Image (cartoon, rainbow, N blue to C red):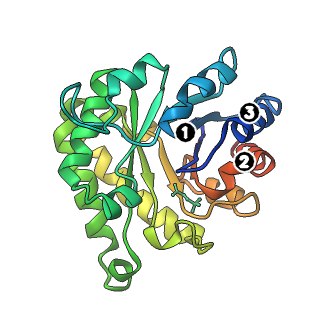
Amino acid sequence: MRRKLVVGNWKMHGSHKGNAELLSGITGARPFGCDVAVCVPFPYLSETAVALAGSDVRWGAQDCSAFEQGAYTGEVSVPMLAEFGCRYVIVGHSERRAYHAESDQLVADKAKAALAKGVTPIVCVGETLAQREAGETEAVVKRQLSAVIHTLGHCAGEMVVAYEPVWAIGTGKVASPEQAQAVHAVLRAQLRAAAANADAMTILYGGSVKPDNAAILFGQTDIDGGLIGGAALKATDFVAICRAAG
Ligand code: PGA
């Protein structure tokens, strides 16, 4: 049995006061029967590390540079994230692919940079509504994942994958459990061809996961937890989703 993982993606939300309340709401609700992490904006990594120290809730970032250091104004490197105790970094979120023109190869390079420093990349893949309607879902997610598999080589089994249909992110339109499971099965099959431990790998679902739909999604064979956006900003909702996974 794979242990479930629930990761909060705070996106560009937060404040010192709000973060403290949210994090204490999460730690105060432990123990969870699943692994739990929060991916916070860079400036809040330090206070998050302090707030979560000594708990089993982990933390991470939402992006990283593919480079270790250098003249890359505005970028944050994986060694920096590692210094702040990050266990995870999200790479290839659809918002970064869309608004920052991140290519499949750049996403793969970021994933490789993360693993090289012992930070687990959460690699996001997913199709747009137009791609789904054109029957391209499988081809799109396979293309996105294969760039990462090829770049990671024998380390591919160490990443976490997140399937996030773009049309379900922040829209309230959740993929049905059957739709999500079908894509997760495709991704698992692709991983089997690349990694000996594919059946032990974690594939998260993301896109409008809420307390009332989490259990049925997480109950699907190949869905190993969730990447949670909006509902990760309210402790009671996030905790309810973690409970649904445990
Ligand atoms: P959502 O976002 O839960 O608000 O749809 C998920 C994500 O973008 O990771």
Q: Earlier in the sequence, mark 3 or mark 2?
A: 3
The residue indicated by pointer 2 is 238
User: Of 46 and 132, which appears nearest the observer?
Assistant: 46
User: How far across and how far down the image is residue 143, in percent?
Assistant: 22, 60
The residue indicated by pointer 1 is 40
User: How far across and how far down the image is residue 184, in percent?
Assistant: 44, 58
The residue lying at 69 percent from left, 20 percent from top is 55
SS for callout 1: loop
Label 1: how many Cα within 10 Å (few below 14, some 14–19, many 20+): many
Would you say residue 22 is visible in this rendering? yes
SS for callout 3: helix
User: Of 182 and 176, which appears nearest the observer?
Assistant: 176
Question: In the rendered image, which quarter contains the C terminus?
Answer: top right
* Whether residue 165 is situated above or below residue 146 in the rendered picture: below
Would you say residue 1 is visible in this rendering? no
User: How far across and how far down the image is residue 17, in percent?
Assistant: 74, 37
Q: Is mark 1 within 8 Å of ligand 1?
A: no
Marks 1 and 3 close (CB-CB < 8 Å): no
Q: What's the residue type where badge 3 is placed?
A: Ala
